[in-house]
Image: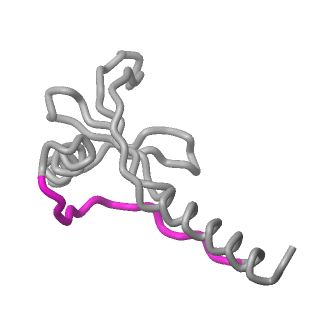
Amino acid sequence: VTLAEKYRLILDAYSIERDYGSAVDVNQGSLNIDGKDVLVDFFNLGRVALYAQSLDQKTGWMYNRETKAWDKLDDSYLRELTKGIRIARKQGALDLFALPIPAAETAQ
């Protein structure tokens, strides 16, 4: 394999990783919270975070990878989560939105 081909493969890998990291996606599903099934929109923010919002938009959760559980979001983030979901569905213009994200792990 030529040096140019190796370089192209590396750039392709970085491009794919960048796309995974910046993609937003939304899907509907069911989430079991405190023994009750709740219909929610799952909002996937790249590889950064996973959120869920009830279809009535009154409650939101963020998935905690450490505890493998859903943590309830503060009500102040509900409007921002709704904005992110609308952007992912292409129902709203691209815009910035503020959501809590998990802290980065320290390198070893």
Q: Quadrant of the C terminus?
A: bottom right
Counting from the top left corner in percent of width and height, residue 65 is at: 55, 49
* Residue beneath the point at 38% across and 25% down: 33
* Residue beneath the point at 28% across and 47% down: 73
Counting from the top left corner in percent of width and height, residue 79 is at: 13, 49
Q: Among all residues in the image, which is located at the extreme bottom?
A: 3
* Residue beneath the point at 83% across and 79% down: 2
Instruction: Identify the image quadrant of residue 34.
Output: top left
* Residue beneath the point at 57% across and 61% down: 16
- The reply, left or right, for residue 35 in relation to residue 40 is right
Q: Among all residues in the image, which is located at the extreme top?
A: 36
Count of all numbered marks drawn on residues in the image: 0
Rendered view: 95 above or below 38? below
Q: Foreground: 79 or 33?
A: 79
Counting from the top left corner in percent of width and height, residue 76 is at: 15, 54
- The reply, left or right, for residue 90 in relation to residue 71 is left
Residue 97 inside the magenta-drawn segment: yes
- The reply, left or right, for residue 66 in relation to residue 61 is right
Q: How is the image coloured?
A: one colour
Residue 83 inside the magenta-drawn segment: no
Instruction: Give the overall secondary structure of the magenta segment.
Output: loop
Q: Foreground: 33 or 80?
A: 80
Counting from the top left corner in percent of width and height, residue 92 is at: 12, 49
Rendered view: 95 above or below 45? below
Query: Which residues, given as a range, are shown in magenta?
Result: 93-107
Q: Quadrant of the N terminus?
A: bottom right
Q: Foreground: 35 or 45?
A: 45
